[in-house]
Image (spheres, rainbow, N blue to C red):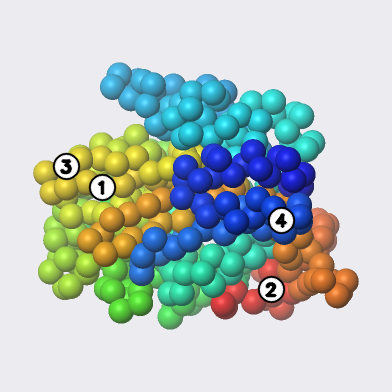
């Protein structure tokens, strides 16, 4: 994505509605102004970064948002079932801007030529580091559908994406298509690759015989001294959406009654902020938010809804914010909480052109280790050399760069 000075000024108005502090870039040159797209002032002391449904897409892509999103019954005409001009109006985004291109299908062919590709793990890694720098202690959450969707993920039995997520710095994860590698492979990754690094949580996955938890239902992590619980909600319909034999010994389901018990337990252990990392799909999350109390936010996935802002849902215990961070690495969700558990959420587009200015070459002209061009041809070369083995970790390290901030 490459913005002219005039185009960036058009972005300012829409971005200010979402809380982006871009005003001071109004008189900057175009290259500097582009960086303002990611200058997001922190709301409070607790922050979560949220990615979901990347489907193993390591490289930047062109991605068109849908022009139809059917909402049935009471959901008709409401988020996430708004597209085009109606979505822009609801979000306060001006047509013809970079944000309008990110969130809608409008003038896609022309806008795609103008703004370029989106996503890519090299660009995502740079954006994660930038936002973590402004949000010390922020946790990176992965909503699942990460290990599946590319030739190399298939040929390496998901190992390329497992290694990529570790390098990216994922803290907590839940799943769906991950289970299509089989329950033994999922447990192998969790017990070996993720041990001591990435927590895999799912309160709604139980053993079929005695109903014991298969995974940790939640974890409590301190963010700037504030205990925060991240509760996992794996895709509830896995056994009917995918072949049953892949998870023959496990049961799923929404299990909102058990979720309430888990949330209450986490609160009882001192969690001051509770979020659910969900792969329900946004409509199910919106309904679940009316039934379960004590949840500050549901960070959702599965339905690939790139919604600009969170939807507040009232319930017997207060209000829960419901979000969804799109798909294919196109968006990175940002959720901030201030004192009194007031929250704010944004879906930030991962614009490859903007990030290329930040990570493609340094000001001294030397190539950066996160140069997205290092991804070019990687999948084809590795497919030929490693059809049944993992991508070498060192190669992924050079590809993505260090994940630590």
x, y percent for residue 248 = 36, 52
Residue picked out by circle 4: 28
Q: Which mark is residue 320?
A: 1
Sort mark 1 into few (<14), some (14-19) or many (20+) by Cα contacts within 10 Å.
many
The first of marks 1 and 2 along the sequence is 1
**On the rendered image, what quadrant is the C terminus found in?**
bottom right
The answer to whether marks 4 and 3 mark residues whose Cβ atoms lie closer than 8 Å is no
Q: How far apart are the two marked residues, 1 and 3, measured between alpha carbons?
A: 8 Å
The first of marks 4 and 3 along the sequence is 4
From what the image shows, is residue 123 above or below residue 287?
A: below
Q: Secondary structure at mark 1?
A: strand
The first of marks 2 and 4 along the sequence is 4
Residue picked out by circle 3: 315
Q: How far apart are the two marked residues, 4 and 3, measured between alpha carbons?
A: 45 Å
The first of marks 3 and 2 along the sequence is 3
**Quadrant hosting residue 46:** bottom left
From what the image shows, is residue 188 above or below residue 274?
A: below
Is residue 199 something that shows in the picture? Answer: yes
Q: Secondary structure at mark 3?
A: strand
The answer to whether marks 3 and 2 mark residues whose Cβ atoms lie closer than 8 Å is no
Front position among marks 1 and 2: 1
Residue picked out by circle 2: 401
Front position among marks 1 and 4: 4
The first of marks 1 and 4 along the sequence is 4
**Quadrant hosting residue 216:** bottom left
In the visual, does 324 lie left or right of 105? left
From what the image shows, is residue 112 above or below residue 294?
A: above
The first of marks 1 and 3 along the sequence is 3
Sort mark 3 into few (<14), some (14-19) or many (20+) by Cα contacts within 10 Å.
some
From what the image shows, is residue 390 above or below residue 355?
A: below
Q: Secondary structure at mark 4?
A: loop
Q: How far apart are the two marked residues, 2 and 4, measured between alpha carbons?
A: 29 Å
């Amino acid at each position: 994505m490459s913005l002219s000075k005039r185009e960036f000024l058009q972005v300012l108005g829409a971005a200010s509605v979402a809380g982006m502090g871009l005003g001071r870039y109004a008189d900057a040159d175009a290259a500097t102004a582009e960086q303002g797209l990611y200058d997001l002032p922190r709301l409070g002391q607790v922050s979560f970064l949220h990615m979901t449904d990347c489907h193993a897409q390591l490289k930047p892509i062109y991605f068109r948002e849908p022009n139809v999103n059917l909402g049935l019954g009471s959901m008709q005409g409401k988020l996430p079932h708004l597209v085009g001009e109606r979505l822009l109006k609801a979000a306060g985004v001006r047509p013809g801007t970079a944000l309008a291109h990110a969130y809608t299908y409008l003038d896609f062919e022309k806008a795609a030529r103008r703004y370029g590709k989106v996503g890519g793990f090299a660009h995502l890694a740079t954006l994660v580091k930038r936002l973590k720098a402004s949000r010390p202690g922020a946790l990176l959450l992965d909503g699942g559908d990460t290990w599946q969707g590319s030739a190399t993920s298939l040929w390496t039995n998901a190992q390329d994406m497992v290694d990529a997520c570790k390098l990216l710095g994922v803290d907590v994860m839940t799943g769906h298509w991950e289970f299509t590698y089989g329950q033994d492979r999922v447990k192998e990754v969790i017990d070996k690759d993720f041990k001591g690094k990435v927590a895999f949580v799912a309160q709604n996955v139980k053993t079929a015989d005695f109903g014991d938890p298969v995974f940790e239902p939640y974890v409590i992590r301190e963010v700037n001294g504030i205990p925060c619980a991240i509760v996992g909600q794996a895709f509830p319909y896995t056994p009917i959406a995918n072949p049953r034999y892949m998870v023959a010994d496990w049961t799923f389901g929404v299990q909102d009654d058990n979720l309430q018990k888990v949330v209450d337990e986490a609160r009882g252990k001192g969690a001051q902020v509770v979020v659910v990392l969900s792969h329900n799909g946004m409509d199910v999350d919106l309904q679940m938010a009316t039934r379960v109390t004590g949840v500050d936010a549901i960070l959702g996935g599965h339905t690939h809804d790139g919604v600009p802002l969170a939807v507040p849902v009232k319930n017997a215990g207060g209000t829960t914010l419901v979000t969804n961070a799109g798909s294919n690495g196109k968006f990175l969700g940002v959720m901030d909480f201030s004192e009194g558990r007031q929250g704010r959420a944004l879906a930030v587009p991962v614009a490859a052109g903007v990030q290329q200015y930040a990570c493609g070459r340094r000001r001294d002209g030397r190539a950066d280790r996160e140069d997205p061009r290092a991804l070019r041809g990687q999948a084809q070369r590795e497919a030929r050399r490693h059809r049944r083995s993992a991508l070498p970790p060192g190669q992924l390290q050079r590809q993505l760069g260090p994940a630590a901030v």
